[in-house]
Image (cartoon, rainbow, N blue to C red):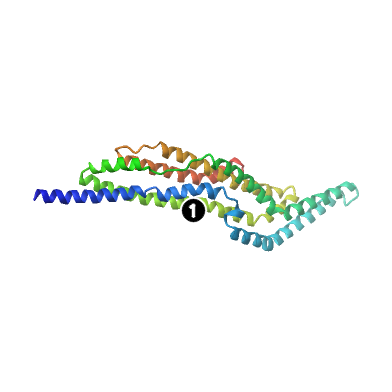
Amino acid sequence: MDSILEQITQWLKEMLVAAVMENLTGLFDSVNTQVSSIVSDVGTTPANFSPGMFSMIRSISESVIMPVAGIILTFIVCSELIQLLIEHNNLANFDTWLIFKWIFKTFVAVTLISNCFNITLAVLDVAQSVISSSGRLINASTAIDDAALATIEETLLEMELGPLLGLYLQTFIIRLTLFALSVVIFIIVYGRMVEIYLAVSLAPIPFATFGNREQSQIGQNYLRSLIALGFQGFLIMICVGIYAVLIQSAVLSTDIISSLWGVVGYTVLLVFTLFKTGSLAKSVLNAH
């Protein structure tokens, strides 16, 4: 009878060890995939990220938003001319060079609004160049090598049935947690790119305000926000680099659960810092 119970216990142990090893083998797959894709996704320009989406955004902006920006620019230019006449006593004390100044300001404003897409893309290209340069210096690997897995399996075979069952449940929970965190990472990275597309689609309107000293603050804040969106990608790369260093320094000791929950803690820290990159970039550039 004892031998039968021992065989059943051994069979259950082997089954649980196999289940735990399966959880551990694929434990970091979802997070590894998302972290590794950050380097390529964040370092991609809006035009290359999704050419079809970018073409649609540009078409809508030029056909729908540009006429609105033209109306705003016309209002600002006319307001500037009226103000110019009033300030100089209805041309009684008027210098000829002021009209040439107004014409030049109008020309610059029209040029800016006509080339707003090229300007916004140039800003984002500069940020993308910085991100690409930093990406080459970052190693984002969080995989567990085969030697570590073999050591873990030997440790598991020496454990009793009860602790093995508890270990299986915890590794299962950790696997679900890391999968959920990988989804959050995906949302943050792709959400930034969608935010860039939204900002680019409205570019003509803030560019139309540069012709007026008071209203130009709208355009200046837009440019600061656009630069912040671009360099948010750089901060994301820094977060990934810090995460990679922390994960590589994590030691999978005989206390497997403690080590795994430590890795989960690092991943939660990564997600938290990724959430903070947007507000940090805007605060540095005084954008709101």
Mark 1 nearby-residue class (10 Å; few <14, some 14–19, many ≥20): few
Q: Nearer the viewer, residue 283 or 268?
A: 268
Residue 86: image x %, image y %?
84, 51
Q: What residue is at 57 percent from the left and 57 percent from the top?
A: 50
Classify residue 249 as left or right of residue 1.
Answer: right
Q: Quadrant of residue 158?
A: top left
Instruction: Read off the residue under disc 1.
Output: 187
Residue 26: image x %, image y %?
37, 50
- What count of labels does the image hold? 1
Q: What residue is at 26 percent from the left and 41 percent from the top?
A: 154
Classify residue 225 as left or right of residue 29.
Answer: right
Q: Amino acid at mark 1?
A: Ile
Residue 223: image x %, image y %?
66, 47
The residue most toward the left is 1
Q: What residue is at 25 percent from the left and 50 percent from the top?
A: 16
Q: State whether residue 94 appears in this view.
A: no
Give the structural element (helix, strand or loop) at label 1.
helix
Q: Nearer the viewer, residue 159 or 100?
A: 159
Q: What residue is at 30 percent from the left and 38 percent from the top?
A: 255
Classify residue 21 as left or right of residue 206.
Answer: left
Q: Nearer the viewer, residue 133 or 195?
A: 133
Q: State whether residue 47 appears in this view.
A: yes
